[in-house]
Amino acid sequence: MSGIVGIVHFDGAPVDRQVLGRLTAFMAFRGPDSQEIWIDGHAGLGHASLKTTEESEHERQPFTLDGRIWIVADARVDARRELIAKLKTKGHENLSPNATDAELILLAYLVWGEDCVEHLLGDFAFAIWDGPQQRLFCARDHLGVKPFFYAHLGQKLVFSSSLDCIRQHPAVSDRLNDLAIADFLLFDLNQDLATTSFADIQRIPPAHTATWSSSGLQLLRYWTLPIDEPLYFRNTDDYVDRFNELLDQAVDDRLRTKKVGVMMSGGLDSPTLAATAWRILRGRSADCEVLASTTLIDGFDRNERYYAGLVAERLGIPIRNIRGVLPFFGHGLGSVIDARERFLAPGGRMIPRCDTVWIAGVHAPELYQERLGPWGRSPYDFDMSAAHSRAINSIDQCWLATDQLFLEPRCLATLDYMTLKQTDLDATVSWTVDHACQGHGIVLWFDSVLAEGVTFTNRPGAPRLIYRQEFFPWPIPLEVCPGDTVTVQFLHDSSGTTMSGAGIRSLPARTRPTAASCPFASQTFLVLIFLSRNCGPRLPGFNRGSTKMAGFNAAFCRLWKEPRRWKPSPRSW
């Protein structure tokens, strides 16, 4: 997906080159290959290019054929052979079969004018500045796959394929559209296809054209989904044959290079498309290549990766990328290692490549009260304390600031998924408290390396994106003093062995705190967190499988506070 942007002043005021350049540069995330602008007095266009086809390798936009009529487009034109044949009958006999999509759209406009959309198939959003007519003609594809937003403010028009791009213009306000917000709250989406959540910004609905001139806006619908009579065939096999014919046409239109990628799942759609693409490409050339990527989805990854691997093996399609919902740590390390060793092609990539899991102590009284406060006695004198154990044995997703960390961040684990072989991970982290504070729990987050030079983090204080931090509350708030020691121990057991209450009491000696590890001159706080993928707690007050911590079950959490000298006792366990 490339990016388009434009500014037109219908009062004749010149377009600010710096503003248009800034809006175009903003869309570099859409079109990293190049960003270019064109300005002619009161009209200006910008384009951020993502080159995805062989025809687009030498394409430059904004594009013109005569220096008077210019186009910017984010488009993939289908049925190219049929369109080129039509244009050749209209006087363009020398039109190359390698013409770019933008050139084909512009030629269609020169031949048929605003009716050009009647001859276009595919996914597109484009804008054509017609200098001789002093008008801007824009269109959006039949189903609205490509977005097109605009802000018409008096005599100023700003448009783009990116809503956030338009918001960068200084004349566009952040005032919300109350009706759109109400629709979202009531129906989960905006019911009006011509508006957005911002009052100043509208959108061209699917299958519509928009023409702006000094006289205003003309918005027209050019296509409606036809409701034809049912199609009947004499033989049952004819339905399958017709479906395969249409499928081949659709896939063939989209195969614009010799090398394509498929997001491979274990279902029906992606294997069908992969097999069809492979057959069509092999019919064109012997040096074609179809590559697959597959995704591990927590809770469903076993069947997904199994069937995706079977399809890839049957078709001879290498799986070059195995992607995971961040962090990969959440899928169970056994699943990750199994997928890598069985399906990943030589030279392939794991995405993310590496996760670094961090841990810190948290001072968060509001969050703690929100999490545990309701499980005391209710105003109606109901005893809700039974739910308290469930609450302290669960993870709460949250946003925390750096000043809420009373224990400095420590690295809990660094997992390189290209080389990782061990699925049982033990980790112990200790802090010496340097200031008096009340602690309410621990927090986990991760730094991910998605690919070389591409990283992601959800650390406290980082920009808020999708993934929050994971907050694990302690049974009671702790008043800690300088010199106190806090130790967190993780034991991850992927063997699937169920841990019973007796098993917890007879833990190996290495998991028990010793006097040597507990300073005599201060208090010591010990937190043990045992993680197991396939088993949950079996102790009174804990609910089996009630909690997810980075994708694992948090099986047991206990905290000790003994003044001055720690002494093991049965009651501690």
Image (cartoon, grey):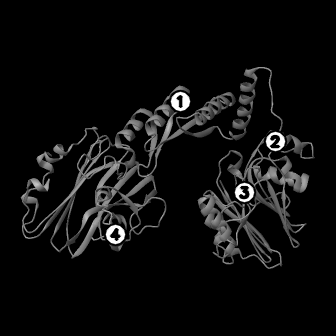
| Residue 142 image position (x, y, % from top left) | 77, 50
Q: How many marks?
A: 4
| Residue 564 image position (x, y, % from top left) | 8, 69
Residue on which disc 1 sits:
311
**Residue at disc 4, secondary structure:** helix
Upstream in sequence: badge 4 or badge 1: 1
Q: Residue at x 82, y 58 (%)?
A: 209
Residue on which disc 4 sits:
369
Q: Amino acid at mark 3?
A: Arg
Q: CA distance from mark 2 to mark 3?
A: 40 Å
Upstream in sequence: badge 2 or badge 1: 2
| Residue 349 image position (x, y, % from top left) | 45, 43
**Residue at disc 2, secondary structure:** loop
Q: Amino acid at mark 2?
A: Ile
Q: CA distance from mark 1 to mark 3?
A: 39 Å
Q: Amino acid at mark 4?
A: Gln
Q: Which picture quadrant has residue 444?
A: bottom left
Upstream in sequence: badge 2 or badge 3: 3
Q: CA distance from mark 4 to mark 1?
A: 51 Å
Residue on which disc 3 sits:
60
- Identify the disc placed on residue 227: 2
Q: Which picture quadrant has residue 29?
A: bottom right
Q: Is the Cβ of the residue at disc 3 closer than 8 Å to that at disc 4?
A: no
The answer to whether residue 93 is visible is: no
